[in-house]
């Protein structure tokens, strides 16, 4: 039953990604990272070392993807600051994994929630705006 549910979720997620706007994909990445951090926290609280590492690794992969998606040329200082913030979160997640540090997970979760709230607040009409250099 569990394997069937996982397969369904995977197909559902892949279907949503295939039709999602770039804005929605970033939202989904924030949501996924927050879920993996919550799962990591639960694993630490229940001494489940295997799943702790698995879920922290998945959160690291998502945050690495967010960092890689930054347009450093067009994004200027904002992109640079976000990259620094993502690097900080990656360090904290590594510390959480090595030390089973719930506080480190909570720190990353709070930062991600703040970024997600800002991203979610972008009006729908601005979701598909391209920079002047991309439009040329």
Image (spheres, rainbow, N blue to C red):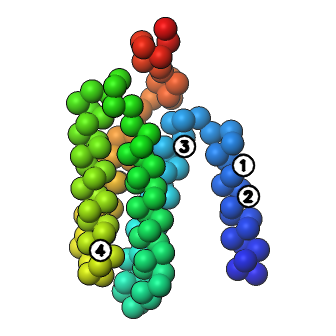
> Do the CB atoms of the residues marked 2 and 1 lie less than 8 Å apart?
yes
> Which residue in the structure is indicated by mark 3?
25
Query: x%, y% of residue 51?
Result: 48, 81
Query: x%, y% of residue 84?
Result: 24, 46
> Which residue in the structure is indicated by mark 1?
15
Which mark lies nearer to you, 4 or 3? 4
Mark-to-mark CA distance, 4 and 2 = 30 Å
- SS class, disc 4: helix
Assess disc 1: are there few (<14), some (14-19) or many (≥20) residues with their C-alpha within 10 Å of its C-alpha.
few
| Direction from residue 115 to residue 129 in the image, left or right | right
Name the residue at 26% across, 62% down: 91
Assess disc 3: are there few (<14), some (14-19) or many (≥20) residues with their C-alpha within 10 Å of its C-alpha.
some
Residue 110's quadrant in the figure?
bottom left
Mark-to-mark CA distance, 4 and 3 = 26 Å
- SS class, disc 2: helix
Mark-to-mark CA distance, 2 and 3 = 16 Å
């Amino acid at each position: 039953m569990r394997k069937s549910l996982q397969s369904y979720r995977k197909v559902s997620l892949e279907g949503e990604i295939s039709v999602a706007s770039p804005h929605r994909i970033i939202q989904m990445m924030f949501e996924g990272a927050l879920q993996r951090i919550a799962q990591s926290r639960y694993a630490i609280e229940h001494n489940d070392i295997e799943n702790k590492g698995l879920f922290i690794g998945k959160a690291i992969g998502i945050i690495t993807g967010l960092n890689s998606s930054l347009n450093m040329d067009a994004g200027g200082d904002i992109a640079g600051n976000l990259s620094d913030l993502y690097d900080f979160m990656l360090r904290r997640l590594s510390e959480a994994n090595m030390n089973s540090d719930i506080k480190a997970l909570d720190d990353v979760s709070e930062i991600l929630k703040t970024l997600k709230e800002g991203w979610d607040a972008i009006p729908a009409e601005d979701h598909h705006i391209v920079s002047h250099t991309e439009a040329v």
